[in-house]
Every structure is written in C-alpha cells, then in structure tokens.
Amino acid sequence: MTAPSSPIARPRTAIVVVAAGSGTRLGADAPKAFVGIDAHTVLRHALHGVFAAPAAQVVLVVPGDRRGDALTEVVESAGERRDLVTVVSGGATRQQSVAAGLAAVWPDVEYILVHDAARALTPPAVFERVIAALEEGREAVLPVLPVVDTVKRVDGEAVVVAVDRSVLAAAQTPQGFRRDVLLAALAEADQEHTDDAALVQAAGHAVTTVPGDERAFKITTAADLERARAAVAPIAPSTASLAPRPALPRVGIGTDVHAFGGGGSLWLAGLEWPGETALHGHSDGDAVAHAIVDALLAAAGLGDIGLHFGTDHPEYAGAHAAAFLTRTRAILAEAGFAIGNVSVQVQARRPRFAARRLEAERVLSDALGAPVSVSATTTDGLGFTGTGEGVAAFAVALVVAV
Ligand code: CTP
Ligand code: MG
C-alpha cells in the first residue's frame, strides 16, 4: 500500500470505518451499511461525517461482495480526499473486520480511530474531540454519553439490584488509539470484544473518556432506523406565514388492502399489536399508513406509493408507518405543500381499535406533523374484512400549496 506523497495527503491519523456486518437485528434485505436512511445509505451518511472530520486516511471495511458499491459511495462523497481512501473486505466478526482494516493503515500513521458505520449520523465534532485527546498524549480515547435510564442488574425476570447510574457511561465510536497500543492489544487478544476500548483495556491500558453525542447513536434495530430517518427528514416549511395564499386546498384519496398471514407481529396504524396475526406486504403491511401515503401523494399530484416506496426501494422493506409518513411529509414539503389534515378509516374484524384509537392517532399525527383522525369499523361479517381474511383502509387527505 503506497501513501500519497503531498503533505496534506500524509495524515497522522487513520479512521477505520467498519461496515462489514450483516445487520441481523435490523432484518433488512441488504447488509446494514447499504440500507437507505433517506435517498442515501447508512454508509453514505457515515462517510459524510468522516469526510467532514479532520483529514485522515480512511480505511473502509465492507462485505467482500460489496466493495464495488462501497467504492461508488466513496467516489460520490470523498471529494478531494478520494486518494486517502482504501476499501477492504471484512471478517466474520467485528474484531476480525477491525483487524482487516488495520492491516491497510499506512506505516507512518500515528493515531487510529475505529468507527462503526452503523453510527451513521455521528457529527464531525466527536472525531475532533477524540483526535485532540490523542494529540494531548492519551493512549486510548472513548466517546461516552451519560446513562439517563435507571439501570438494574437482573437475573432472568428477577431484579437483583439497582445500579448507580452516575458511575456508568454508554460507549460510542469513533474510539481512538495510539497505533502501537491498538496493534499490540489486537495481537495478544485471546477473546472477542464488542468494542476496541474493551480490547485495549484488557491489554492493561488506560482508556480516557471524552463527551460523545446523542446523534452518534447506533442503528441496530428497525426503531433505530426510523429514528435516523426522522433525524434527517427536512423540516416542513412553516405554515404560519401571513402572506395571502391564493391556491385552493387540494384533496386526495387513498386505499389499501393487505391479507393476514405475514411473519412477525401485526403492525397497523403505526402500532404494534402483540398476539395478533401479522399482515403480508413488501413493508410491514400497514394498510392504514399506506392508504394515508397514497391520499397525500394524490392530493399533491405527486404520484402514488408505488412510485416513491415500491419494491425498487428495498430500504422500505420491513419499514413501519413512521418511516413512510416522515418521508411522505418531506416529499410534499419539497414540492411546496403543507398538510392540512388526514382522515383514515380501517375496516377490520381484528384487531379491536377502540382501546388504542387515540394512541394510533397520536403516533400517526406525530410522524406526519399534522392531525390524523382514525376510525374503525367492522363490516357485519361481509366481504374479506368481515371474514377476517384481511384489512382495508381508506384515507382522505387535504393539502395546501404554501
Ligand atoms: N461489523 C463489521 N464486521 C462484522 C460485524 C460487524 O464490520 N463482522 C461492523 C458493522 O458493520 C457495524 C459495527 O461493526 O458498523 C457495529 O456492529 P453491529 O451494530 O453489531 O452491526 P451488525 O453486526 O451488522 O448487526 P447485527 O449484530 O444485528 O447483525
Ligand atoms: Mg453485530
């Protein structure tokens, strides 16, 4: 591996970005780093933070069969730093992927940061803090957040004891190390560690903390992905303007039908319904959310759900209502529309909506940033909703050009 020769291209620091995991807990169709947050993947967002941090060699560790895709992402996001990037294949465990990345670090690099691509929205300031602590002479630096939840030690279902959270911290990445410290720790490791600070600490080195950042949360589950999607969604334009609005409001209608019999739990109207049979569908089969999306797109004259979220958008496989509604809100905002309100009716024998109707309204309204009314009805045993084969939803939306 040859390092470029110009001074700016011979950085003292390398950032190893591990992105070779499969994302089992996320359960998407693609490896986690290649799942979309918005129009861009988890990896692309992670690279955005990495390239906004101080210039460093960047070693990107990805699944072997994804190196081409990763290079495309690099070419599109590295700009002038393209020559500082190397893409390598990862291993079966995170630690093996880190080792594969370290093997590609240039010989004259002094500090190595290891970063999870899954912490896709990590701001550049966290990289800066870690690098600054290393330059002040720390051997190993860990960004942390205070623990806000009350924490218990448990044994199965039983609570054993409350743990004092003031002595706890949640570890994030990028974690930074003096090169020799990290390489020696990895060489003598006799077990797998979930992060690199644990590896270095096991080898007897002091690890120092610096403040992490809420936005550096790790995308592990579908709920985390929805959190990331909400965090990157553009804010809808304010409707508080006093300017006259000559455009008349526009209405749209949307319907959707899904059959029972999918895997996992039932998701309907943005809620999980434990114990109820799941619905089939490319995503979670949430007919209520899909009818709302169609009604909104129709009201704005922006096509339909298949156009924006169809099977050629694999990142929406398994996605829940909030992801669809937040994205739809952004699509409308980009086209200059504010949402007035949405009314949706679900026809279903099960689940029984009465006890959770208000909860559904709150979840859907929060995701959309506009009031959503939910009503539910059975059909007197008639038709496929009456026999319990599936559910149908009908939505009407009102939007206005702003
Ligand atoms: N990672 C890696 N190589 C592996 C396993 C994990 O490079 N063999 C990376 C992931 O891509 C991720 C980071 O390590 O950026 C943190 O791992 P985790 O969040 O556990 O991701 P996955 O292993 O992909 O997810 P899961 O454990 O749910 O399968
Ligand atoms: Mg993992």
Image (spheres, rainbow, N blue to C red):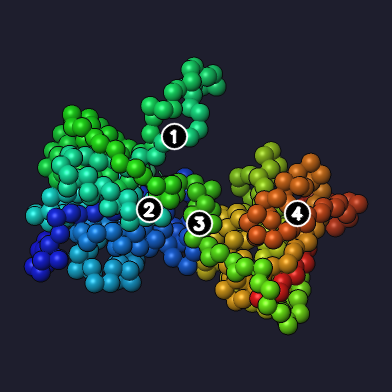
Give the residue displayed 17% in from the left and 47% down from the top: 135
Amino acid, disc 2: Thr
**Dot label at residue 147:** 1
Amino acid, disc 1: Val
Q: Label 1: how many residues lie within 10 Å, few (<14), some (14-19) or many (20+)? A: some
Q: CA distance from mark 3 to mark 1?
A: 21 Å
Q: Choose between 38 and 31: the one closer to the eye.
A: 38
Rendering coords of residue 319 (x, y %): 57, 55
**Dot label at residue 182:** none
The residue where tag 3 is placed is 231
Give the residue displayed 32% in from the left and 53% down from the top: 125
Helix, strand, or loop for circle 1?
A: loop
The quarter of the picture where the N terminus appears is bottom left
The residue where tag 2 is placed is 122
Quarter of the view holding residue 108 = bottom left
Q: Label 3: how many residues lie within 10 Å, few (<14), some (14-19) or many (20+)? A: some
Question: Which-is-in-front pick, marks 1 and 4?
Answer: 1
The residue where tag 4 is placed is 390
Rendering coords of residue 245 (x, y %): 71, 79
Amino acid, disc 4: Gly
Q: CA distance from mark 4 to mark 3?
A: 33 Å
Q: Quadrant of ligand 2?
A: top left
Amino acid, disc 3: Ala
Decide which of tag 4 and tag 3 comes sooner along the chain: 3
Q: CA distance from mark 3 to mark 2?
A: 12 Å
Q: Are circles 1 and 4 on residues that touch, CB within 8 Å? A: no
Q: Are circles 4 and 2 on residues that touch, CB within 8 Å? A: no
